[in-house]
Image: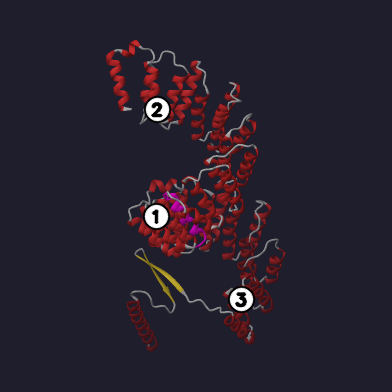
Amino acid sequence: MAHLKQTHARIIVTGLSLQHDQTSPKILHLCSLATPPDPNYAHLLFHRIQSPDALSWNCLLRAQARSQDPIRILSLYNELLKSGAKPNGITFSFVIKSCSNLKKVRFLMGIHAQLLALGFQSDTLVLNSLIHGYIAGGSLNSACVVFDELSERDLISWTELIKGYVRNGRAKEAVELFLLMMEANVRPDEITAVAVFTACAQLGDLNLGRKVESLAFKCGIRYNTYVVNSLIDMYGKCGSIGDAWKLFDGMVNKDVVSWNSMVAGYSRCGNMEAARRLFDRIPKKNEVSWSLLINGYVQNGGFKEALMVYREMSDSGIAPNEAAITGTIAACSHLGSLDFGREIHVSLDKSKLQSDVILSTALVDMYAKCGCLGMACELFDGIVKKNLVSWNVMIMGLAIHGKASECLELFSEMLKDGLIPNSLTFVGVLSACAHAGWLEKGKEYFDKMTRVYGIAVRAEHCSCMVHLMGQAGLLTEAFEFIRDSPIEHDVATWGALLSACRFHGYVELGKFVGERILELDPSHRGAYVQLSSVYAAAGRWREVLEIRKKMKDIGIKNRPGWSYFDLNGTIHEFLVGVNSHPRIKDIHSVLHTIDLQMRSQCYAQTAR
């Protein structure tokens, strides 16, 4: 741009601009392509043209489009129409792009109407741009209408709509459209293939993925890095880590996406040891590499390891992205690592936190699970645009702290705010009722869930209801509730009834329920222990001995107790009977001193 301005200045000084009328249009054309863009300079050049034609208007629009100011482009388009100049296909491509960037579908519909009025209904290039615009603007249905009305569909038409389906999570329709495209004898390119592989990955359908890859191969799709990366991702998400590794191992030019896709694949299949080894081999890690490893550990229960990786990432000087921060906060929630969670909270920019509902919600969840309900409420109140997940997290946080009244009040506020509850919302509400022992309220909300909101009953809802009935001593009603429910109940629901049987001394029902749990999970240690307690409470010691013998015969042992302790951001892990902590001697020494002091105090009080 600087060179262009210097050349323009020389033209003006030498008087050439006065001799040639086409100087300004030509410089305007170059200005629209120059880097960095200067839309103000383009405007000055444009206004020197006495009768700008469509080409000049398009150059001005292009210069403005590259400055990322979509509202200004619409304003210029209105000026173009008022001037009497006739827009062409290139004009509409800039205007459609600006409308989609603004997410204003009604503007796009207005442009669509003008296109038809001006006779562009057979212009595939312009209508492809409109399909793209509708999808980017969030109106896939409108894009489908344009696609259906196309007289001639080219590769771009099919690919744009396939990508639209994938982007909107409608993977099955994306694959179906791809197969229709093949029937229409339109050969896919690499972009189409990647979109369809992504759809197969979303579906997690390995056989379909292999079928689509075979079709793409027969069509001569080049296995470049872009295509192979999408295949690695697809096979990883479909659970075929062997196929993913073969592709990865055979790649000549691996980029960071290739490495990241394999790390994600190993994490997804639970092999964190392989994921970590591969991660350590990545030549140049980016923030996505780190976030994938952190979230892999979180998803596989390696919460302590996730925090250690976050520390490594910070020490390496790489700024964590949203996914890494959210995953680490989740690990803090599971470990009860309040200090670590606070450290992350302090490091976050306040303005960013207010606008980022995902991070704010993760922090609300962390503080609630770590016992800081007041801080959780404060953060929740500070979220400007709360989504359903935010409300659900806060409702559940209040429920687990036994704040049943506040939980139900918050649920009422959520409804007043115009949000429609989902299945997880009612898990929180019913949990609150269960904690408070409000059987009638629980029944009322359970009825509303199915009758008013049409939410399908899940095992979690039934577990809360059984817990409520068990607390009230209505064990026969609880059993009939489980028996008559249309869903297949899990161990947790039957376990709630078994706990009630133990508490109320229902031996025969407890025996039946315990056997039902062991049918679902033969190695369920808790069921044996609970059933043993039921028999012990009834004085049936022979059955107690039989259960213990059975546990011994099948190799079920009582799991040793364990705990985590967070001190100054470092996680200390303790396991009963294991003295592996580096300062275990100091810990035992202090415990011995405390024990002596307690004995001394106890002796002194007894003497008095």
Give the residue type at disc 2: Leu
Residue 341 in sight from this viewpoint: yes
Labelled disc at residue 282: 1
Residue 62 position within the rendered picture, expressed as x and y whole percent measured from the top left: 44, 27
Q: Residue at x 46, y 29 (%)?
A: 71
Per the image, is 184 magenta?
no
Per the image, is 269 magenta?
yes
Name the residue furthest bottom. 607
Badge 1 crowding class, 10 Å Cα cut-off, few under 14, some 14 to 19, many 20 or more, is: some
Disc 2 or 3, which lies upstream in sequence? 2
Q: Secondary structure at mark 1?
A: loop
Labelled disc at residue 503: 3
Q: Which residue was labeled with disc 2?
A: 33
Labelled disc at residue 206: none
- The magenta segment: 254-270
Q: Select label 2 or label 3 by which is in front.
A: 2
